[in-house]
Image (cartoon, rainbow, N blue to C red):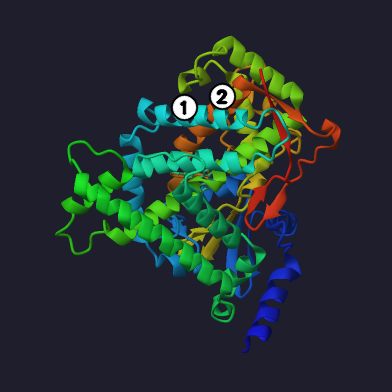
Amino acid sequence: MGPVALLVLCLSCLLLLLDVKNISKSLSNLSKIYGPVFTVYFGMKPMVVLHGYEAIKEALIDKGKEFSGRGSFPVAEKANQGFGILFSSGKRWKEIRRFSLMTLRNLGVGKRNIEDRVQEEARCLVEELRKTNASPCDPTFILGCAPCNVICSIIFQKRFDYKDKVFLNIMERFNENVKILSSPWIQIYNNCPALLDYFPGSQNKIFKNVDFIKSYVTEKTKEHQASLDIHNPRDFIDYFLIKMEQEKHNPHGEFTIDNLTITVSDFFGAGTETTSTTLRYALLLLLKHPEVSAKVQEEIDRVVGRERSPCMQDRSHMPYTDAMVHEVQRYIDLLPTNLPHAVTCDVNFRNYLIPKGTTIITNLTSVLRDDKEFPNPEKFDPGHFLDEGGNFKKSDYFMAFSAGKRMCVGEGLARMELFLFLTTILQKFTLKAVVDVKDLDVTPVMNGFTSVPPPYQLCFIPV
Ligand code: HEM
């Protein structure tokens, strides 16, 4: 079949039932007819869709092992060649994931060490925002730098100036890859991999960017090797090098340079855009709801004051702020259809037989917008995470980071960044909209598989 016929076939299969701009909504509509478990054909591939808390919990948590495979992502597979953590499966994924979680813990996620780095970054972020002199600005670039620098400091033990050429180059390459990977065309390529060979443009750009990252990480790894002290590992690369040395006689070992470079690249890919988009959306929602900003600022004043930097210990005394951050993540529903999973063996699920390797789509929107758990789910209301006494109220339906064995590796880090960056910004500035608040549009723009805020400007007025 020629490329045009193939493209027409793929497009028609994909578009007949689904609105590619809002896949999660189309899937929710289908679930009204077909129930919580059904199959759709994306292109020529069958995928099982799970809708609602019960079905998703049963799969990702109760049958976690069986549902822990990664669904196919041909573009990423070609670029990463099966290495790393994000798109790998089986023994490799298990080992690299266990190592990554342990290393993040060793480096102090949830402890002082990484908290210090995030606090330092929060202070730099505030200094950059101060340079806008309270005039209208689009916060996208600055809010992109801070999470990227946090990953840099975990991986390379180094933060960069926001004008540093190397830093800007790294950010640009990743942003470009995220942009390409989330374009509707790539969704079509992914479901019709044969097309990749006919339209090589974007694919080549992705490969070029991955090659750049690989060579940068290789160069940094050489520097690390030269100065490594095995008794005093400084960062993720040092921990990986130590593990490589311990496993060097294991012919089936996973601790290789290829897995190091792609895992580092996965950390940037998974940990930068997600956090920065959430921050950007949070500021837009705070602009739209000045009554929420005022309550958060009142809590900051009362618990932290104006002088010292907010820290993670403060969070347990700041239920309203904690609820606001959860509500931002619930409301924006950043990854509405999650990353695709796959079943690792034939699975009997609610009387259906799902064959090994089948891709599984979990519709996280159906959990985050459940109207029994969150009354009025379309409304932005931190009250969704507060009890009658104003205490923070946890919810099992908070699945912004997914759930089970494949759940986000960076959850602890991301939650720390969101809390510290947002409280530090609101401690130092009042947010001012440049249009009438009632004209501020907060409707998401679907960007492939992520939900992004519409472009906007605001002023940071020093308090
Ligand atoms: C607001 C910020 C973030 C959100 C909403 C988020 C959300 C997610 C989600 C939904 C997944 C897919 C889970 C699944 O397959 O079931 C994921 C995976 C992942 N995330 Fe995050 N994430 C965020 C920040 C971060 C950060 C800061 C890091 C950096 C360490 C990170 C690293 C990862 C990795 C490595 C995976 C792949 C896990 C695997 O395949 O086993 N994420 N994230």
- Residue 407 horizontal side relative to residue 395, left or right: left
Q: Is residue 94 above or below residue 188?
A: above
Query: Hey, which quadrant is residue 350 in on the image?
Result: bottom right
| Disc 2 packing (10 Å; few <14; some 14–19; many ≥20) | many
Residue named by callout 1: 119
- Residue 49 horizontal side relative to residue 459, left or right: left
Query: Hey, which quadrant is residue 373 in on the image?
Result: top right
Q: Position of residue 171 (x, y in %)?
A: 51, 50
Q: Is residue 99 above or below residue 200?
A: above
Q: Is residue 174 above or below residue 78?
A: above
From this viewpoint, is residue 374 visible? no
Q: Residue furthest left?
A: 249
Within 8 Å: ligand 1 and the Cβ of disc 1? Answer: no
Amino acid type, residue under disc 2 in the picture:
Thr
- Residue 216 horizontal side relative to residue 9, left or right: left
Q: Nearer the viewer, residue 406 or 311?
A: 311
| Disc 1 packing (10 Å; few <14; some 14–19; many ≥20) | many
Amino acid type, residue under disc 1 in the picture:
Gln
Q: Secondary structure at mark 1?
A: helix
Q: Which mark is residue 157?
A: none
Q: Secondary structure at mark 2?
A: helix
Between discs 1 and 2, the one toward the N terminus? 1
- Residue 445 horizontal side relative to residue 274, left or right: right
Within 8 Å: ligand 1 and the Cβ of disc 2? Answer: no
Q: Nearer the viewer, residue 207 or 302?
A: 207
Q: Residue at x 62, y 46 (%)?
A: 334
Q: Position of residue 57 (x, y in %)?
A: 54, 45
Callout 1–callout 2 Cβ contact below 8 Å: yes
Q: Position of residue 108 (x, y in %)?
A: 35, 32
Query: Hey, which quadrant is residue 257 in on the image?
Result: bottom left
Residue named by callout 2: 424
